[in-house]
Protein backbone atom coordinates (compact mmCIF):
# COMPACT_ATOMS: atom_id res chain seq x y z
CA UNK A 1 0.00 0.00 0.00
CA UNK A 2 1.29 3.46 -0.88
CA UNK A 3 2.51 5.77 1.88
CA UNK A 4 2.44 9.55 2.14
CA UNK A 5 6.13 9.50 1.16
CA UNK A 6 5.26 7.62 -2.04
CA UNK A 7 2.57 10.18 -2.89
CA UNK A 8 4.97 13.01 -2.09
CA UNK A 9 7.48 11.57 -4.57
CA UNK A 10 4.78 11.53 -7.27
CA UNK A 11 3.81 15.13 -6.49
CA UNK A 12 7.40 16.33 -6.70
CA UNK A 13 7.86 14.42 -9.97
CA UNK A 14 4.76 16.00 -11.45
CA UNK A 15 2.98 12.64 -11.85
CA UNK A 16 -0.81 12.37 -11.76
CA UNK A 17 -2.36 11.03 -8.57
CA UNK A 18 -4.53 7.90 -8.56
CA UNK A 19 -7.64 7.16 -6.53
CA UNK A 20 -5.44 5.10 -4.19
CA UNK A 21 -3.16 8.12 -3.75
CA UNK A 22 -6.23 10.21 -2.91
CA UNK A 23 -7.12 7.72 -0.18
CA UNK A 24 -3.62 8.05 1.28
CA UNK A 25 -4.00 11.84 1.38
CA UNK A 26 -7.51 11.63 2.85
CA UNK A 27 -6.42 9.38 5.72
CA UNK A 28 -3.11 11.13 6.38
CA UNK A 29 -2.98 12.78 9.80
CA UNK A 30 0.34 14.50 9.18
CA UNK A 31 -1.12 17.92 8.38
CA UNK A 32 2.32 19.52 8.09
CA UNK A 33 3.37 17.11 5.33
CA UNK A 34 0.10 17.73 3.48
CA UNK A 35 0.63 21.46 3.73
CA UNK A 36 4.19 21.21 2.41
CA UNK A 37 3.02 19.12 -0.55
CA UNK A 38 0.23 21.55 -1.36
CA UNK A 39 2.65 24.45 -1.08
CA UNK A 40 4.90 22.72 -3.62
CA UNK A 41 2.03 22.74 -6.13
CA UNK A 42 0.94 26.32 -5.46
CA UNK A 43 4.49 27.65 -5.77
CA UNK A 44 4.89 25.81 -9.05
CA UNK A 45 1.76 27.56 -10.33
CA UNK A 46 2.13 31.01 -8.79
CA UNK A 47 5.60 31.37 -7.33
CA UNK A 48 5.49 33.54 -4.22
CA UNK A 49 2.59 35.73 -5.37
CA UNK A 50 -0.70 35.81 -3.47
CA UNK A 51 -3.48 37.83 -5.03
CA UNK A 52 -6.29 39.61 -3.21
CA UNK A 53 -9.51 41.19 -4.43
CA UNK A 54 -11.27 44.25 -3.05
CA UNK A 55 -15.03 43.85 -3.49
CA UNK A 56 -17.95 46.26 -3.35
CA UNK A 57 -21.11 44.30 -2.51
CA UNK A 58 -24.12 45.83 -4.19
CA UNK A 59 -27.60 45.24 -2.74
CA UNK A 60 -30.42 44.78 -5.23
CA UNK A 61 -32.44 47.48 -3.48
CA UNK A 62 -29.66 49.99 -3.97
CA UNK A 63 -28.53 49.23 -7.51
CA UNK A 64 -30.02 52.40 -8.97
CA UNK A 65 -28.37 54.76 -6.49
CA UNK A 66 -25.06 53.02 -5.81
CA UNK A 67 -21.82 54.97 -5.62
CA UNK A 68 -19.01 52.51 -6.26
CA UNK A 69 -15.67 53.19 -4.54
CA UNK A 70 -12.93 53.56 -7.17
CA UNK A 71 -10.72 51.21 -5.10
CA UNK A 72 -13.06 48.29 -5.81
CA UNK A 73 -11.65 45.57 -8.02
CA UNK A 74 -15.05 43.97 -8.46
CA UNK A 75 -18.66 45.07 -8.03
CA UNK A 76 -20.69 42.08 -6.87
CA UNK A 77 -24.41 41.29 -6.61
CA UNK A 78 -24.93 38.21 -4.44
CA UNK A 79 -28.73 38.21 -4.27
CA UNK A 80 -30.53 36.68 -7.26
CA UNK A 81 -33.85 38.32 -8.32
CA UNK A 82 -37.05 36.31 -8.58
CA UNK A 83 -37.55 36.98 -12.29
CA UNK A 84 -35.43 37.23 -15.41
CA UNK A 85 -36.71 40.74 -16.16
CA UNK A 86 -35.60 41.89 -12.70
CA UNK A 87 -32.21 40.25 -13.14
CA UNK A 88 -31.68 41.96 -16.50
CA UNK A 89 -32.73 45.32 -15.03
CA UNK A 90 -30.34 44.87 -12.10
CA UNK A 91 -27.44 44.06 -14.41
CA UNK A 92 -28.19 47.06 -16.62
CA UNK A 93 -28.17 49.46 -13.65
CA UNK A 94 -25.18 47.82 -11.96
CA UNK A 95 -23.18 47.86 -15.19
CA UNK A 96 -23.69 51.62 -15.40
CA UNK A 97 -22.73 52.12 -11.76
CA UNK A 98 -19.61 49.93 -12.04
CA UNK A 99 -18.20 51.72 -15.07
CA UNK A 100 -14.91 50.08 -16.01
CA UNK A 101 -14.79 47.98 -12.83
CA UNK A 102 -15.61 44.28 -13.46
CA UNK A 103 -19.13 43.30 -12.46
CA UNK A 104 -20.14 39.86 -11.19
CA UNK A 105 -23.68 38.89 -10.30
CA UNK A 106 -25.91 36.07 -9.14
CA UNK A 107 -25.66 32.42 -8.17
CA UNK A 108 -25.85 29.83 -10.94
CA UNK A 109 -28.07 27.58 -8.80
CA UNK A 110 -30.60 30.36 -8.17
CA UNK A 111 -30.63 31.35 -11.83
CA UNK A 112 -31.50 27.74 -12.72
CA UNK A 113 -34.70 28.07 -10.63
CA UNK A 114 -36.14 30.81 -12.84
CA UNK A 115 -39.01 29.71 -15.14
CA UNK A 116 -36.96 30.19 -18.31
CA UNK A 117 -34.40 27.55 -19.37
CA UNK A 118 -30.91 28.29 -18.08
CA UNK A 119 -29.41 28.93 -21.56
CA UNK A 120 -32.13 31.55 -22.17
CA UNK A 121 -31.44 33.18 -18.80
CA UNK A 122 -27.70 33.33 -19.36
CA UNK A 123 -28.05 34.66 -22.92
CA UNK A 124 -30.31 37.47 -21.66
CA UNK A 125 -27.86 38.40 -18.90
CA UNK A 126 -24.98 38.33 -21.35
CA UNK A 127 -26.94 40.64 -23.62
CA UNK A 128 -27.46 43.03 -20.71
CA UNK A 129 -23.70 43.29 -20.22
CA UNK A 130 -22.92 40.59 -17.64
CA UNK A 131 -19.77 38.58 -18.34
CA UNK A 132 -19.11 37.16 -14.88
CA UNK A 133 -21.33 34.99 -12.66
CA UNK A 134 -20.50 35.42 -8.98
CA UNK A 135 -20.48 31.76 -7.96
CA UNK A 136 -21.85 28.24 -8.40
CA UNK A 137 -22.20 25.91 -5.37
CA UNK A 138 -20.98 22.56 -6.67
CA UNK A 139 -22.62 20.54 -3.90
CA UNK A 140 -26.09 21.85 -4.81
CA UNK A 141 -26.02 21.70 -8.60
CA UNK A 142 -28.18 18.84 -9.86
CA UNK A 143 -26.29 18.58 -13.16
CA UNK A 144 -22.95 20.31 -12.55
CA UNK A 145 -21.33 19.60 -15.89
CA UNK A 146 -24.36 20.65 -17.94
CA UNK A 147 -24.88 23.80 -15.93
CA UNK A 148 -21.24 24.81 -16.04
CA UNK A 149 -21.18 24.07 -19.75
CA UNK A 150 -24.17 26.40 -20.21
CA UNK A 151 -22.10 29.22 -18.71
CA UNK A 152 -19.31 28.59 -21.20
CA UNK A 153 -21.73 28.30 -24.11
CA UNK A 154 -23.22 31.69 -23.20
CA UNK A 155 -19.80 33.29 -23.50
CA UNK A 156 -19.68 34.00 -19.77
CA UNK A 157 -17.22 33.14 -17.02
CA UNK A 158 -17.69 31.79 -13.52
CA UNK A 159 -15.86 33.87 -10.93
CA UNK A 160 -15.59 30.99 -8.48
CA UNK A 161 -16.77 27.44 -7.92
CA UNK A 162 -17.94 27.17 -4.32
CA UNK A 163 -19.25 24.74 -1.72
CA UNK A 164 -22.33 25.64 0.32
CA UNK A 165 -22.20 22.99 3.04
CA UNK A 166 -19.74 20.44 4.37
CA UNK A 167 -20.36 17.37 2.16
CA UNK A 168 -21.13 13.98 3.67
CA UNK A 169 -18.87 12.16 1.20
CA UNK A 170 -15.09 12.15 1.28
CA UNK A 171 -13.56 15.51 0.42
CA UNK A 172 -11.09 13.82 -1.94
CA UNK A 173 -14.07 12.67 -4.05
CA UNK A 174 -15.28 16.27 -4.29
CA UNK A 175 -11.82 17.44 -5.38
CA UNK A 176 -11.55 14.73 -8.01
CA UNK A 177 -14.95 15.80 -9.39
CA UNK A 178 -13.71 19.38 -9.63
CA UNK A 179 -10.65 18.20 -11.56
CA UNK A 180 -12.84 16.15 -13.93
CA UNK A 181 -15.14 19.11 -14.63
CA UNK A 182 -12.12 21.26 -15.34
CA UNK A 183 -10.62 18.71 -17.73
CA UNK A 184 -13.88 18.54 -19.67
CA UNK A 185 -14.80 22.23 -19.65
CA UNK A 186 -11.66 24.20 -18.78
CA UNK A 187 -13.78 27.06 -17.43
CA UNK A 188 -13.10 26.93 -13.68
CA UNK A 189 -10.81 29.84 -12.80
CA UNK A 190 -11.03 29.61 -9.01
CA UNK A 191 -12.22 27.03 -6.49
CA UNK A 192 -13.20 28.14 -2.98
CA UNK A 193 -13.23 24.90 -0.94
CA UNK A 194 -14.35 26.19 2.45
CA UNK A 195 -18.12 26.04 3.04
CA UNK A 196 -20.05 29.26 2.52
CA UNK A 197 -22.64 28.26 5.15
CA UNK A 198 -21.07 28.17 8.59
CA UNK A 199 -23.03 26.15 11.15
CA UNK A 200 -22.41 27.90 14.48
CA UNK A 201 -23.72 24.85 16.37
CA UNK A 202 -21.29 22.49 14.62
CA UNK A 203 -18.38 24.64 13.49
CA UNK A 204 -15.54 23.18 11.48
CA UNK A 205 -12.10 22.89 13.02
CA UNK A 206 -9.03 24.77 11.89
CA UNK A 207 -7.39 21.41 11.26
CA UNK A 208 -10.25 20.30 9.03
CA UNK A 209 -10.36 23.60 7.16
CA UNK A 210 -6.68 23.73 6.24
CA UNK A 211 -6.68 20.03 5.34
CA UNK A 212 -9.54 20.70 2.95
CA UNK A 213 -7.55 23.53 1.37
CA UNK A 214 -4.46 21.36 1.03
CA UNK A 215 -6.36 18.43 -0.53
CA UNK A 216 -8.05 20.81 -2.96
CA UNK A 217 -4.70 22.11 -4.14
CA UNK A 218 -3.24 18.61 -4.44
CA UNK A 219 -6.16 16.94 -6.23
CA UNK A 220 -7.42 19.77 -8.46
CA UNK A 221 -4.08 20.83 -9.87
CA UNK A 222 -5.67 21.83 -13.18
CA UNK A 223 -7.63 24.60 -11.44
CA UNK A 224 -5.38 27.63 -11.30
CA UNK A 225 -6.60 29.27 -8.12
CA UNK A 226 -7.58 28.01 -4.67
CA UNK A 227 -9.38 30.79 -2.89
CA UNK A 228 -10.27 31.69 0.69
CA UNK A 229 -12.84 34.28 1.74
CA UNK A 230 -11.35 37.01 3.95
CA UNK A 231 -14.67 38.41 5.16
CA UNK A 232 -16.24 35.04 5.96
CA UNK A 233 -13.26 33.29 7.59
CA UNK A 234 -11.17 36.15 8.90
CA UNK A 235 -7.48 37.05 8.70
CA UNK A 236 -6.09 34.23 10.85
CA UNK A 237 -7.51 31.30 8.90
CA UNK A 238 -6.93 33.10 5.60
CA UNK A 239 -3.27 33.57 6.45
CA UNK A 240 -2.77 29.94 7.50
CA UNK A 241 -4.62 28.72 4.39
CA UNK A 242 -1.97 30.42 2.26
CA UNK A 243 0.66 28.05 3.65
CA UNK A 244 -1.58 25.06 2.80
CA UNK A 245 -2.04 25.76 -0.89
CA UNK A 246 -4.38 28.76 -1.21
CA UNK A 247 -3.14 31.57 -3.47
CA UNK A 248 -5.99 34.09 -3.55
CA UNK A 249 -7.92 36.06 -0.91
CA UNK A 250 -11.46 37.05 -1.86
CA UNK A 251 -13.90 39.59 -0.37
CA UNK A 252 -11.50 42.19 0.99
CA UNK A 253 -13.45 45.37 1.66
CA UNK A 254 -13.17 48.14 -0.92
CA UNK A 255 -13.48 50.81 1.80
CA UNK A 256 -10.13 51.15 3.56
CA UNK A 257 -11.15 52.40 7.01
CA UNK A 258 -8.11 53.97 8.67
CA UNK A 259 -9.94 55.34 11.72
CA UNK A 260 -7.89 53.04 13.99
CA UNK A 261 -4.59 53.86 12.30
CA UNK A 262 -2.80 52.76 9.16
CA UNK A 263 -1.63 49.40 10.54
CA UNK A 264 -5.16 48.44 11.59
CA UNK A 265 -6.69 49.39 8.25
CA UNK A 266 -8.13 46.40 6.29
CA UNK A 267 -5.88 46.77 3.25
CA UNK A 268 -2.71 46.97 5.31
CA UNK A 269 -3.85 44.01 7.42
CA UNK A 270 -4.32 41.90 4.30
CA UNK A 271 -0.95 42.86 2.84
CA UNK A 272 0.82 42.33 6.16
CA UNK A 273 -0.83 38.94 6.64
CA UNK A 274 0.27 37.77 3.20
CA UNK A 275 3.83 38.97 3.75
CA UNK A 276 3.98 37.35 7.20
CA UNK A 277 3.07 34.02 5.59
CA UNK A 278 6.12 34.38 3.34
CA UNK A 279 4.43 35.56 0.14
CA UNK A 280 4.24 38.68 -2.01
CA UNK A 281 0.86 40.47 -2.00
CA UNK A 282 -0.54 41.43 -5.40
CA UNK A 283 -3.87 43.18 -5.87
CA UNK A 284 -6.07 41.99 -8.75
CA UNK A 285 -9.45 42.80 -10.23
CA UNK A 286 -12.44 40.55 -10.90
CA UNK A 287 -10.92 39.42 -14.22
CA UNK A 288 -7.69 38.36 -12.47
CA UNK A 289 -5.82 41.27 -13.99
CA UNK A 290 -3.19 42.73 -11.65
CA UNK A 291 -3.78 46.28 -10.47
CA UNK A 292 -1.26 49.02 -9.81
Image (spheres, rainbow, N blue to C red):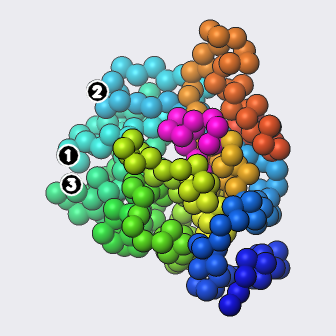
**Label 1, label 2: how far apart the Cα atoms are:** 15 Å
Q: Quadrant of the N terminus?
A: bottom right
The answer to whether residue 262 is seen in the rendering is yes
Q: Secondary structure at mark 1?
A: loop
**Location of the C terminus (image quadrant):** top right
Residue at 39% across, 41% down: 200
Instruction: Report the front residue among 120 and 9.
Output: 9
Task: Classify residue 117 as left or right of residue 43.
Answer: left
Label 2 secondary element: helix
Q: Residue furthest left?
A: 115
- Residue 83, numbered circle: 1
Q: Is residue 287 above or below residue 146?
A: above
Q: Residue at x 68, y 32 (%)?
A: 270
Residue 246 lies left or right of residue 189; in this view the side is: right
Evaluate if marks 1 and 2 touch, with contact meaning CB atoms under 8 Å apart.
Answer: no
Give yes or no for contact between labels 3 and 1 (Cβ–Cβ under 8 Å).
Answer: yes
Which numbered disc flags the more N-terminal residue, 1 or 2?
2
Indicate the position of residue 254 as horizontal and vertical percent values. 57, 26
Q: Which residues are magenta?
A: 227-238
Query: Where in the figure is residue 210, as x and y percent of width and height?
Result: 62, 54
Determine which residue is flagged by label 3: 114
Front-lying residue, 81 or 195: 195
Looking at the rendered structure, which numbered label has been put on residue 94?
A: none
Our reading of the magenta stretch's main secondary structure is: helix
Above-or-below relation of 169 to 259: below
Q: Position of residue 140 (x, y in %)?
A: 34, 62
Q: Which residue is mark 2?
A: 61
Rounded to the nearest angstrom, the CA distance separating label 3 from label 2 is 19 Å
Amino acid sequence: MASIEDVADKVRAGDSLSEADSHVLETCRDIISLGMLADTIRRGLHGTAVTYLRVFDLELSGVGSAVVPPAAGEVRILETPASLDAAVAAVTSAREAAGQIPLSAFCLLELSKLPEPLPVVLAALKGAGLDLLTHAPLDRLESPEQMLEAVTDAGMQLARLTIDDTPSRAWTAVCRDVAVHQRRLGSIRAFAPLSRNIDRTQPTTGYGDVKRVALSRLLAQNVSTIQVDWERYGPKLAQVALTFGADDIDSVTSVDDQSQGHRRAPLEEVRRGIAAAGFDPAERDGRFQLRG
